[in-house]
Amino acid sequence: MLSFALVAAPAADAQNAIGEVFSGDASVRGSVLFSNHGTKVLSGSQVTAGEGVALLKLERGGQLRICPKTNLSLSADAGGKALVLGLNAGSMELNYSLATAADSLVTPDFRLQLISPGTFHLAISVSPAGDTCLRSLPGNDASVFVAEMMGNDSYQLSPGKNVMFRAGRISGATEAPADCGCAEIIAPKIAEPAPTPAEPANQGVPPPDKPTEGHMEVDSSFVYRGKEAAPDLYNAVSRLSVATNDSKLALALIPKVTGPEAKTEAPAKKPGILHRLGSMLGRVFRR
């Protein structure tokens, strides 16, 4: 969101608007013009970029990129064609074409003349100590004339060339560093969560070389009455034992008869109920 220190823009001054500011945290001091499309700055304004880059789209075409924490003052002639830019310390990038006009960029130590015709795509940085960097960016095909504000030296920067002036002096100019202009903003990488390891297909299933072994015992009481039985009931308590091994089932019935008839042998001709039950179960499990 833009913040403003002063708002004063009569409708008659609409033709004097320099450009429209696009930024999430820039501040503007001076005159602005509110319209249906956005916020336009007028001559005499100052734009200060916040933590991000502020973009100024010029009414006449082209744009200025104001790097983070940089203050740029803007003035224009009556027709809004020729601009005078003021940069005390910080960085900026300009990208526009001039057909007939001539712009100026003023720093504490230098005056830069951008004379038409040509396309200007430049990165400019000024340090508090006066070190001034000029770097040609892709598409730049015009020359820039540099003159000292407090001296007599001058310099012509040809298209495609780069230069660094140390301590506000043209003498001893060197090649410009690569970090001239707005630093590239790289979004932080978000660590991707590690993939969840796939569960084994046979989870919960024993290995094939170790077959399931189980054992189950059930205590059960059988009450029966035979034809030869006395008035007292024959009570039989047996243990039913079931065991599995390698998919084979084993069954055992252990009868236990209590009472005075416990020692009496069952007639050979007529098997008892336990014998018949055991034979039946045997036939079932042999199938």
Image: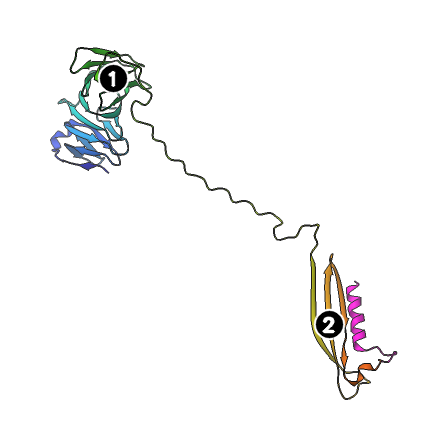
- Residue 42 is situated, as x and y percent measured from the top left of the image, at 16, 29
SS at circle 2 = strand
Image-quadrant location for residue 173:
top left
Image-quadrant location for residue 47:
top left
Closest to the observer, 84 or 33: 84
Figure disc tally: 2
Closest to the observer, 16 or 69: 69
Determine which residue is flagged by label 2. Answer: 239
**Magenta segment boundaries in residue numbering:** 266-287
- Which quadrant of the rendered structure holds the N terminus? top left
Residue at 17% over, 29% down: 46
Residue at 38% over, 35% down: 188
- Residue 88 is situated, as x and y percent measured from the top left of the image, at 19, 24
Image-quadrant location for residue 184:
top left
Is residue 64 inside the magenta stretch?
Answer: no
Q: Is residue 53 left or right of residue 29?
A: right
Q: Nearer the viewer, mark 2 or mark 1?
A: 1
Is residue 270 inside the magenta stretch?
Answer: yes
Task: Look at the picture and state if 73 lies above or below 146.
Answer: below
Which is more N-terminal, label 1 or label 2?
1
- Residue 236 is situated, as x and y percent measured from the top left of the image, at 75, 78
Q: Bin the neighbour count of mark 2 within 10 Å (Cα to Cα): few under 14, some 14-19, many 20 and up.
A: some
Q: Bin the neighbour count of mark 1 within 10 Å (Cα to Cα): few under 14, some 14-19, many 20 and up.
A: some
* Three-letter code for the amino acid on which mark 1 is drawn: Arg
* Three-letter code for the amino acid on which mark 2 is drawn: Arg
The CA distance from mark 2 to mark 1 is 105 Å
Task: Look at the picture and state if 207 lies above or below 72.
Answer: below
Say the numbered circle drawn on residue 16. Answer: none
Determine which residue is flagged by label 1. Answer: 166
- Residue 170 is situated, as x and y percent measured from the top left of the image, at 23, 13
SS at circle 1 = helix
Please indicate, yes or no, whether residue 81 appears anywhere in the rendered image: no
